[in-house]
Image: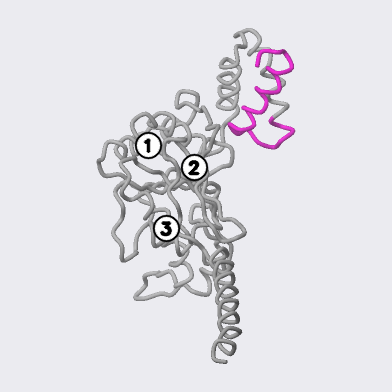
Amino acid sequence: MTSRVFAPMNDALIHLLARAEQLITRIEAVLPQPLAAPDWTAAIAWRYRQRSNGFGTLEPVRHVSTMRLDQLKEIDAQKDKIERNTRQFVQGRSANNVLLTGARGTGKSSLIKACLNRYAAEGLRLIEVDKTDLVNLPDIVDLVAERPEKFIIFCDDLSFEEGEADYKALKSILDGSVAASTPNVLVYATSNRRHLLPEYMKDNLAQTRSEDGEIHPGEVVEEKISLSERFGLWVSFYPFSQDEYLAIVAQWLSSMGVEAQEIEQARPESLIWALERGSRSGRVAWQFARDWAGRRQHA
């Protein structure tokens, strides 16, 4: 009698426990997981990617740009500053987070890639993080903190619109977090905006105050300036003159095997190319050189 009563109850309990275990497994599968370390020997550069299931991963960049420092022309002053800072960092000396700002196509991101290639053999590594993933910076920093390599966190074309709060995670990593800065991590960011946030005349008119004849920016202006000020090194890039543009075109064509006489013949066409695009940037020079050399089967 007793066994017949408890047998169905045991079966029901076993079935309930099995269903509960299945449910827990499915819940765990969709919960965010700790960032896992990749195979650090697989590459010298990685991209952080946030998957739709909430998992963050570091994906190796299989084909890293082969840009070299000597290929970048007409930005010698900027090159000297960035390379010096990077060299100090790789050698274990004090170095700064870097903000590269200015005209588009003038070599900001190319300079960072060239530094990676220059110092990769000495332990320099790069992790590219999109603006939308900046909230995960603390996890990335914790993951690499005990590694022997030196890591550049690379944020390309960084800027924030009014009302966005992602920049607060970046501020904490740069300076202001309770945690101490990690000696093997620096942030290198490029932007067309010097202060990374949009600046409006109304901010100055409405917020600026005067005390004893001195002008003091208001809270809105202070908030926008405070982010860029956390970068210890600012490097500005400027639009190229016509002569600088032509020198960059010549350098790229020469690197593609084009003879000096043909480079001279390409000058008028390169100026038309720039005029049609409304820009004499290094990027436009590179695009023209690829097109011109490709049409002549030099590339």
Residue 46's label in the rendered image is 2
Residue 139's label in the rendered image is 3
Residue 124's label in the rendered image is 1
Instruction: Give the distance between the C-alpha atoms of the residues marked 3 and 2, in whole angstroms.
Output: 15 Å
Residue 114, compared with residue 36, is above or below; it is above
> Hey, what amino acid is under mark 3?
Asp
Along the line of sight, the residue nearer the viewer: 275 or 169: 169
Instruction: Give the distance between the C-alpha atoms of the residues marked 2 and 1, in whole angstroms.
Output: 12 Å
Please state the extent of the stretch shown in magenta in the rendering.
274-299
Contact between marks 2 and 1 (CB within 8 A): the answer is no
Measuring 39% from the left and 32% from the top, which residue is drawn there? Answer: 120
Residue 173, compared with residue 165, is above or below; it is above
Give residue 187's position: percent from left, percent from top.
41, 49
Any magenta on residue 126? no
Residue 130, compared with residue 41, is above or below; it is below
Give residue 14's position: percent from left, percent from top.
56, 77
